């Protein structure tokens, strides 16, 4: 059967674009059977039709930067690589049609000569449009523009039945393969400034967020980095006309006190995740005004300071748990946090963990990230 299946995959995708999986074609230790790289929406439809006929488990993969996030599938028969579905298919100055396998970096580079940009900035290196949408991955610009799934004008995808659908009401993945999306375009900002201030506690962060939340500042990003050491930073991003940005940065620096500094470059940690693949990572969502309470609740649950980084303004942060914790201990920490977040309309999920632990604990499901 494997030989005939491979032949069918090659017939759909073309010579050199389908193969038997290698050892690195895996999710959290679960190795795939085959890898296919379609170049057209029609090919994606044919692959999914074949997968349905054969009862194959399918998982799409862009750059692979987030491939092992969340719940590991029970089986992984076929990986559909989206790298050949790439390119900026159309843009009219207000919107752009972007193929799913296009990296965000490449899309931004294509738009830059036209003075335009997408208002998405995922922290994952090499993140693709499809991967960003499938996991609703956002960076600092989420504060002003919202998450990618909320920005998309429409999303094109192929369902398990092999039918192509273009939906303006896409609400997250349900077994389909995203092939393209229409995104709004923004004028590239004339000027950008970061106002940065050192912080050491969640309470300081909460006080600063309340100080700078006035609409007049029109902030594009409100981020915090609180390492376990406690020597952290709170940073704001202003974008727009040069005069507006210069004046706004000055007002913000005065509002944040004498320790605040205005920078023309982002802090080194800005728009980067505080974790690696060997860490146990929690994604926490809560109203910004409750973020400080969650920070202390997390420290109490763990029994030690925990590294936190993310959008203090939008209330989405990542926490890195200390290494060496058992699966049972991690479960207790998550349950404790859920109880604290329940009254605050928040959420906590385990985003990623080493394979051995991921198999023993409840991991995030795709719908948890929307």
Image (spheres, helix red, strand yellow):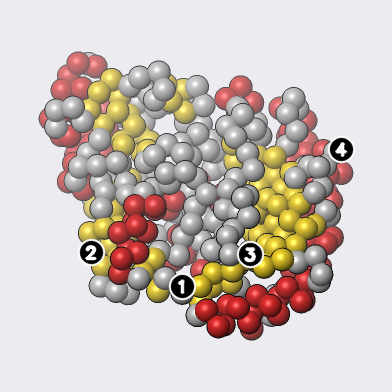
How far from the left and from the top, in percent, is residue 183?
A: 36, 65
Q: Tags 3 and 4 in contact by the CB under 8 Å rule?
A: no
**Which residue is denoted by mark 4 in the rendering?**
303
Question: Which dot, 3 or 2, sits closer to the camera?
Answer: 3
Identified at 40% across, 18% down, the residue is 23
**Which residue is denoted by mark 3 in the rendering?**
263
Q: Earlier in the sequence, mark 1 or mark 3?
A: 1
How far from the left and from the top, in percent, is residue 120?
A: 46, 60
**Which residue is denoted by mark 1 in the rendering?**
189
Question: Which dot, 4 or 1, sits closer to the camera?
Answer: 1
Question: Which dot, 1 or 2, sits closer to the camera?
Answer: 1
Label 2 crowd bin: few (<14), some (14–19), many (20+), radius 10 Å: few
How far from the left and from the top, in percent, is residue 339?
A: 78, 50
Q: Earlier in the sequence, mark 1 or mark 2?
A: 2
Q: Is residue 343 above or below residue 256?
A: above
Q: Is residue 181 above or below residue 10?
A: below
How far apart are the alpha carbons under marks 4 and 1? 44 Å
What is the secondary structure assignment of the residue under circle 2?
strand
What is the secondary structure assignment of the residue under circle 1?
loop
């Amino acid at each position: 059967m494997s030989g005939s299946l491979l032949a069918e995959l090659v017939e759909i995708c073309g010579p050199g674009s389908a193969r038997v999986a290698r050892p690195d074609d895996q999710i959290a230790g679960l190795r795939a059977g085959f890898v296919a790289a379609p170049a057209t929406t029609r090919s994606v439809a044919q692959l999914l039709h074949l997968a349905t006929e054969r009862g194959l488990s399918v998982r799409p993969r862009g750059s692979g930067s987030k491939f092992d996030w969340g719940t590991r599938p029970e089986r992984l028969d076929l990986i559909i690589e989206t790298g050949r579905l790439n390119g900026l298919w159309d843009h009219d100055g207000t919107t752009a049609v972007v193929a799913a396998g296009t990296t965000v970096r490449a899309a931004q580079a294509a738009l830059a000569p036209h003075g335009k940009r997408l208002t998405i900035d995922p922290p994952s290196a090499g993140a693709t449009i499809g991967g960003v949408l499938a996991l609703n991955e956002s960076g600092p610009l989420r504060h002003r523009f919202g998450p990618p799934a909320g920005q998309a004008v429409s999303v094109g995808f192929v369902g398990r039945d092999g039918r192509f659908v273009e939906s303006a009401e896409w609400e997250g993945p349900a077994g389909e393969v995203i092939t393209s999306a229409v995104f709004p375009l923004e004028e590239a900002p004339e000027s950008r400034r970061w106002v940065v201030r050192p912080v050491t506690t969640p309470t300081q962060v909460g006080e600063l967020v309340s100080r700078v939340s006035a609409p007049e500042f029109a902030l594009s990003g409100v981020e915090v980095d609180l390492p376990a050491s406690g020597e952290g930073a709170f940073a704001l991003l202003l974008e727009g006309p040069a005069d507006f940005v210069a004046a706004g940065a000055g007002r913000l620096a005065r509002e944040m006190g004498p320790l605040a500094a205005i920078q023309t470059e982002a802090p080194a940690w800005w728009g980067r995740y505080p974790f690696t693949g060997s860490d146990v990572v929690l994604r926490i969502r809560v109203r910004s005004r409750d973020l400080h309470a969650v920070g202390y609740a997390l420290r109490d649950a763990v029994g030690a300071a925990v590294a936190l980084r993310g959008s203090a303004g939008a209330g989405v942060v990542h926490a890195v748990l200390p290494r060496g914790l058992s699966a049972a201990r991690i479960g207790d920490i998550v349950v404790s946090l859920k109880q604290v977040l329940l009254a605050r309309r928040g959420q906590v999920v385990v985003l990623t963990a080493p394979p051995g632990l991921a198999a023993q604990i409840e991991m995030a499901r795709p719908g948890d990230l929307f």
